[in-house]
Amino acid sequence: MYISDAIKIAEKALLTNKKRAVLTILGIVIGITAVIVIMAVGAGAQSLIVNQINSLGSNLVGILPGGGDEKSPPAFAFGIVITTLKNEDIDAIRRELPEVVAASGIVTTDEVVSYEEEANSYTIIGGSAEFPTVNDLEIDEGRWFSGEEERGLGRVAIIGSQIKEEIFPDEDPIGHKIKIKKESFTIIGYTKPKGSAMGQSFDKTVYLPVSSGQKLIMGIDYLNYARIKIDTAENIEPTILEMERILRQRHNIDNPEDDDFSVRNQAAALDTLTSITDYLRFFLAAIAAIALLVGGIGIMNIMLVSVTERTREIGLRKAVGAAEEQILLQFLLEAVFLTFIAGIIGIILGGLISLFISFVMNYLGYSWSFVISFSSIIIGVGVAGVIGLVFGYYPALRAAKLDPIDSLR
């Protein structure tokens, strides 16, 4: 018997019991669909994170309060307030290192911003005069605040493009006064749309001079974090070493293990985040593989039932000369045929669900990429075929070993 004949027999046997075939492949379809969706969502999320980090600008270094090795999250990530990073630290770095193109100490909070009868809660960022350079932020109309306003409690504000549309849809906001915690600030400009990065919308933010944010709004004298822009990628690592030297000197630290700050390279942070999303994606795919295991067991059970129901057919075929290998091949092909069909359906279904998720995420304003990798398709089809072979082998072997005389009784 040729393989084509075996395929025709397997196809006929499956079409004879359509409902049972559908129920049999359901577990495999769910498993393959889950794997495809997880791989696609993981790739889309990874693309979103990379694009958002890159949108902040290149050659960036972050300084965070709180120590910790490079592989551990800083204290700031856990919401722990550490007050060791000061404006003077950033001034010293800016003054002593010619490789620093721009630097900004940053404080951030959420507050209610009111204008006449309207009041809304927005993110408030206090930054330096170099904040737009560090974050690749562009002014649409007006100006950014000056160095004098940065250091002298300037009561000036720049609003994000979305705030401009929400509060001043039909008029020029420049010159108007807004109130934050009963303090009055004059709007001197508004930004071009930039979108979001790391969960923060640049377009729904009010920007103040860092001293104004610290003293007038938050009542603090320290920084939440700082961003430093280096002139070239080659100078990043040596400049980080110099920054650490300056900060240790200013904080009277002799042993690097006692650092009360963390200096992070954006490229290294990007690699770490990419590795984390890769691990997370494959971990979730492994969980989805449990559904495939359950589906495989279902395949084996149904095939055993099929062998029992077709005992006389098997006996008759062996009585007219069919070899054990031919019976084995026939039932194995039935199992593989079932899982292959399930794999194709799962890939199509997974692709459609992933496309829907991509559509929803882009509708919500995220730059979400629809990614179905060729490797995930190959993995889906390959895994389905392997499941058919593994879980179909025992029923096929049982059919091949049936005695023709006993089968015909």
Image (cartoon, helix red, strand yellow):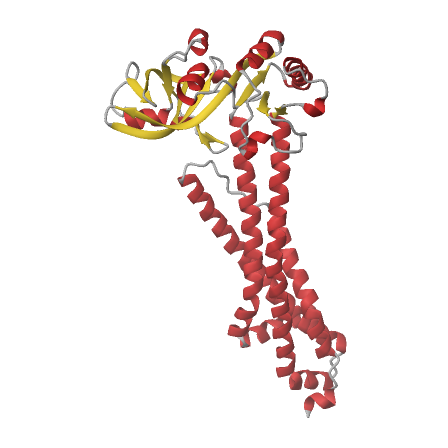
Whole-percent x, y for residue 33 in the image: 54, 56
Whole-percent x, y for residue 191 in the image: 39, 20
Q: Nearer the viewer, residue 105 or 394?
A: 105
* Depicted 350 relative to depicted 210: above or below: below
* Depicted 357 relative to depicted 396: above or below: above
Left or right: 188 in relation to 7: left
Q: Can residue 1 be seen in this view?
A: no
Whole-percent x, y for residue 206 in the image: 39, 23
Q: Residue furthest bottom?
A: 409
The quadrant of the image that shows the N terminus is: bottom right
Identify the residue at horizontal 60%, vertical 14% (top origin).
Answer: 231
Identify the residue at horizontal 66%, vertical 84% (top origin).
Answer: 311
Quarter of the rendering containing residue 209 = top left
Left or right: 160 in relation to 100: left
Whole-percent x, y for residue 111 in the image: 38, 28
* Depicted 197 relative to depicted 100: above or below: below
Q: Can residue 156 be seen in this view?
A: yes
